[in-house]
Image: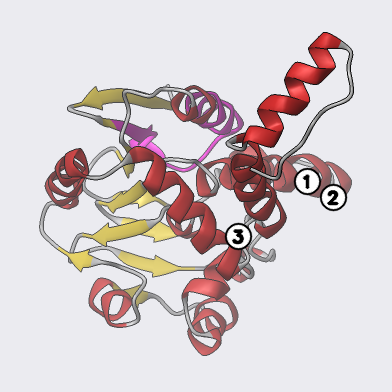
Amino acid sequence: MSTVTCTYDDGAAVLTLCNPAKLNALTTDMLHQLEAHLTDLDCNSDVRAVIVTGEGPRAFCCGADIAEWGPLAPAEFARNWVRDGHRVFDRLARLSKPTIGALNGHAFGGGLELAACCDIRVMAPRATLALPEAKVGIVPGWSGTQRVARLLPEAVVKEMALFGRRISAERAFALGFAAEVVEDPMIWAQDIVATLTDISPRANEIAKAMIHGAVGEDRAAAIEMLGSAAAAASADRDEGVQAFIEKRSPKFNGQ
């Protein structure tokens, strides 16, 4: 049965795509499970970081399961499949905690789009990247032409999307998409999570929001979150709330 499991390892939550018979292709159920896990993890203060990986040595994720989306009518495909995937992937990209994509194998189509949602990525030497949607008559639908295009040069994205070319792990590293190329991405990911014990979780959350505001990842929400946090920490906020409770006019002092 295709699933997304969530396990815990010394401060890290590990989300594993478990559909190895289909190279961890994403199904509707897996999208829903992934979304549920991410919602829970965002509120779990014991989790310092989230690692996303795939089961087995061959693939991180080869994309969306064609058996799921292939039979859909065009309107249903666009309205439900594409939009649902976007919502779930945005949830990962905008998670308040640091995220690491441990690419144990190939990341094609939706798999590449999923990896792009992570803050950093580490790849096994055998792993490759691709946007092969045109070979089955469609186009990238989960931000392959948007988020991926912010992380890789335009010409490289076109090379994959228009010409069906694969990008090696070494080239992905040279282009800055992968932080490292190592034999065991999970060990590397777990080691870097271990360094977070000396880093403030709140500072991490704020820094991530600031960077997202700069690069255009949910910029409006990032700006308002940072502004709201500053306002909520003020004496004026405390006075305003207390005045409301006491049914009197507030006496603000700008502090």
Give the percent coordinates (x, y) of residue 231.
66, 41
- Determine contact: label 3, label 2, CB under 8 Å: no
Distance, label 3 to label 2, CA atoms, is 28 Å
What residue does disc 2 label? 74
- Mark 3 neighbour class, 10 Å CA radius: few under 14, some 14 to 19, many 20 or more: some
Give the percent coordinates (x, y) of residue 99.
37, 46
* Stretch of the chain drawn in magenta: 13-37
Whether residue 144 is visible: no
Seen at 69% across and 66% down, the residue is 137
Seen at 79% across and 31% down, the residue is 251
Say if the magenta span includes residue 29: yes
| Label 3 residue SS | loop
The amino acid type of the residue labelled 1 equals Phe
Q: Quadrant of residue 143?
A: bottom right
- Mark 2 neighbour class, 10 Å CA radius: few under 14, some 14 to 19, many 20 or more: few
Residue 77: which disc?
1
Viewer-nearest residue: 21 or 28: 28
Give the percent coordinates (x, y) of residue 119.
40, 56
Distance, label 2 to label 1, CA atoms, is 5 Å
Say if the magenta span includes residue 239: no
Viewer-nearest residue: 120 or 170: 120
What residue does disc 3 label? 217
Residue positioned most to the bottom: 155
| Label 2 residue SS | helix
65 versus 104 height, above or below: above
The amino acid type of the residue labelled 2 equals Pro
Residue positioned most to the top: 246
Q: Earlier in the sequence, mark 3 or mark 1?
A: 1
The amino acid type of the residue labelled 3 equals Glu
Q: Is residue 88 left or right of 9 when viewed as pictured? A: right
